[in-house]
Image: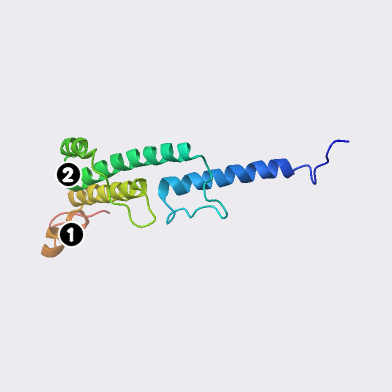
């Protein structure tokens, strides 16, 4: 007589659980144990060859993001200068923190570069300092004497 299963959905539940642990392990490999803690009870959720390929791919993308972020931070309002510098920085390896990977460090550097670009754009659109320190309110000022305001 064929072996009976405990419940009809046990096979599906086990498969989904294995996939979930694999994805979780992939996140740990890509971003580091500090960002994505390893799955409980799993020391090596995938093969060593796959882990090496994942590490290499994550490090490559991390270097690219690092190069882009540092170049944008150095040239926030000069896209050509940023692209030129990023090309030169592609071989630089960012310093990951404890429990992080090169990919995580690259993402952080990209965020820093985007922050500098946003600051530069805001300084053009709504300059800090000069308008605030001289009392010039810019577009929100009341109409000058002799001009009529909105009716």
Label 1 neighbour load within 10 Å: few <14, some 14-19, many 20+: few
Please say if 56 is above or below 42: above
Please say if 87 is above or below 13: above
Residue behind mark 2: 75
Residue 106 horizontal/vertical position (percent): 31, 46
Quadrant in the rendering for residue 142 = bottom left
C-alpha span from label 1 to label 2? 29 Å
Please say if 147 is above or below 15: below
Residue behind mark 1: 137
Observer-nearest residue: 123 or 114? 114
How many numbered callouts?
2
Label 2 neighbour load within 10 Å: few <14, some 14-19, many 20+: many
Please say if 68 is above or below 43: above
Residue 101 horizontal/vertical position (percent): 37, 49
Element class at badge 1: loop
Name the residue: 54% across, 45% down.
Answer: 45
Element class at badge 2: loop
Observer-nearest residue: 137 or 44? 44
Split into 4 quadrants, where in the image is the C terminus? bottom left
Name the residue: 17% across, 43% down.
Answer: 77
Q: Which mark identifies residue 33?
A: none
């Amino acid at each position: 007589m064929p072996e009976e299963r405990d419940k009809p959905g046990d096979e599906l539940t086990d498969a989904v659980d294995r996939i979930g642990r694999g994805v979780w392990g992939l996140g740990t490999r890509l971003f580091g144990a500090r960002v994505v803690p390893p799955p409980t009870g799993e020391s090596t959720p995938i093969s060593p060859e796959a882990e090496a390929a994942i590490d290499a791919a994550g490090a490559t993308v991390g270097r690219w993001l690092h190069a882009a972020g540092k170049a944008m931070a150095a040239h926030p309002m000069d896209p050509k200068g940023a692209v030129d510098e990023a090309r030169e920085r592609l071989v630089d390896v960012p310093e990951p923190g404890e429990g992080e990977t090169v990919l995580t460090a690259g993402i952080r550097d990209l965020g820093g570069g985007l922050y500098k670009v946003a600051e530069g754009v805001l300084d053009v659109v709504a300059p800090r300092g000069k308008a605030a320190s001289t009392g010039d309110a810019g577009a929100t000022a009341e109409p000058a004497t002799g001009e009529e305001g909105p009716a």
